Amino acid sequence: MALKLYGLAMSTNTARAMICLHEKELDFELVPVNVFTAEHKQPPFLSKNPFGLIPVLEDGDLTLFESRAITAYVAEKLKETGADLIRHKDAKEGAMVKMWTEVESHYYEPAVSGIIYEYFVAPFEGKEPNKSVIDRNIEKLKEVLDVYETKLSSSKYLAGDFYSLADLSHVSETHYLMQTPCASMINERPHVKAWWEDISSRPAFTKVVGGMTFATMRVTASLYEKQLDFEFVHIDMKNGEHKKEPFILLNPFGQVPAFEDGDLKLFESRAISQYIVEEYYDKGSQLISKESKKMAIVRLWLEIESQHYDQAASKLVWELRIKPMYGIPTDTAAVEENEGKLGTVLDFYEKTLSKSKYLAGQCFTLADLHHLPTVHYLMTTRSKMLFESRPFVIAWVADITARPAWSKVIAMHATH
Ligand SMILES: N[C@@H](CCC(=O)N[C@@H](CS)C(=O)NCC(=O)O)C(=O)O
C-alpha cells in the first residue's frame, strides 16, 4: 500500500517530508489537509496528530507526525536505497548528521521562519510584514550563517563531504527565504551560496516545487476534475529550464504549462483545459455541454473570465501577493484602479449568481474552474473584500474552492 502524507506542499514542514520521500523514490499519496478551514484542528485529523499540525505520514499501521521524525524514519527504512541520508555504516558520520539536523531545528529554522512568516503568512492575514521582527531575526540568522560559512569552507555539506538529512532539512524553508530580500544573506557568503545551489538543484526538490504556476494550476484542476491519470513533468524554472530546448520546442514562448497527449502538443492553459474537457467528455465531472445554446453560454463566460475578470484580477495578484514577497513596493494607484475594474466585473457576477448557482447556469463548468487560481490568491489579500461584500459571489467562491479536485491542486502547490 502506498504511503500517505497528509499536508500541503506549500508548508515547509510537509515539503521537508516530500523531498525525503522523493530522494528515496517512494510512491506516496499526498492527502490534502485544508488548513484554511482549520481541518487540521478537527477531531479526525487530531487523532493523527494531537498537536493539529501538518505533515502526518501513514505507513500501514504506523502514524507519524513531526517532519524531522518522518524524514528520519524514511531515511532509516530505505537506508540501502539511493543516497544514504543518515550515514548508517559509520557511527561518527551518523552522529554528525544528527548534530547538524539539530542545528537546523534549533538555530536555523527559528530565525528563518520568523522572516518567512512576515513575508508570506502575515500578508495572508492582511498584515504588513513587521520590520522589527524581520530585523531581529536577520541578526540571529547572520550568526548562524557565519557558522555555516566556516563549516562549509572545510566540507562540501554540513555533516561532511556527503549530502545528508542535515542538508535536506534546510531546503524547504531556504526556498522561501530566497524569495525575500534576505536572499542576499545566502548569496553574499560564497560557501553557503554554493551549498544552497547544490542542495536546491537536486531532482527530489525540483519535483516538489517545479513549475506549478497559476496557469498550471488551471490545467491540473481540469485533469483532476476529469479524473485522468497524468504525469506531472517538473520544469526547473529557477534554472531557466522553461526558456531552453527541449522545453521551448513544446512552447516557443517559454512559459509553463505545456501539454502532451500522444502526438498532440499544446500550450496556453485555457486551450489545454478546453481540449481536456472536450476530448474526455465522458469522464469525471461534466464541465461543458453538448447542447449548443448551453455551450454558447459556457463559451461566453470563458471569454468574460479571460477578457474582463482576469485583466484586473491577475494585476491585483501581482501587486498584492507577488511583489511584497520580493520586497518590491506595491503600486497603490494600480491596486485602486484594478480594484475598481474588478468591482465592476463582480457586480455583473453578483447579478448572474443571484439567478443561477454557477456562472453559466446551475452546473459547475469550465468557466467557473478557470477562475480558481486567481480567486484563490485574491482571497489572501485585501481585495477579498470585493468578493466578501457580494453575498452571491462569496457563496460561489466558497463552493468552487471546496471542490475535491481543487484541494488536490492546492496540496501539490509549493509556493506562491
Ligand atoms: N515541528 C513540526 C512543525 C509543523 C508545523 O508547524 N506545521 C505547520 C505548516 S508548515 C502547520 O501545520 N501550521 C498550521 C497551524 O499552525 O495551524 C514539524 O516539523 O512537523
Image (spheres, rainbow, N blue to C red):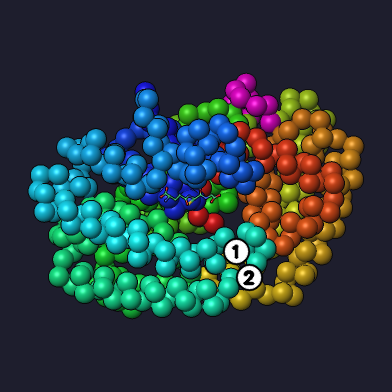
Question: For mark 2, what is the residue?
Answer: 128
Task: Give coordinates of residue 370: x percent, y percent.
Answer: 67, 44
- At mark 2, the secondary structure is loop
The foreground one among 186 and 248 is: 186
Cβ(mark 2) to ligand 1 < 8 Å?
Answer: no
- At mark 1, the secondary structure is helix
The crowd level at tag 2 (other Cα within 10 Å; few <14, some 14-19, many 20+) is few
Residue 345 in view of the camera = no
State the count of labels. 2
Dot 1 amino acid type = Ala
The crowd level at tag 1 (other Cα within 10 Å; few <14, some 14-19, many 20+) is some
Residue 122 is tagged as 1
Left or right: residue 248 compared with residue 121 = left
Most distant residue in the front direction: 50
Q: Which of disc 1 and disc 2 is earlier in sequence?
A: 1
Q: Which residues are magenta?
A: 278-287
Real-space CA distance between mark 2 and mark 1, rounded to the nearest whole angstrom: 6 Å
Dot 2 amino acid type = Glu
Most distant residue in the top direction: 282
Q: Looking at the magenta stretch, what is its main secondary structure?
A: loop
Left or right: residue 324 compared with residue 76 = right
* Residue 243, magenta (yes or no): no
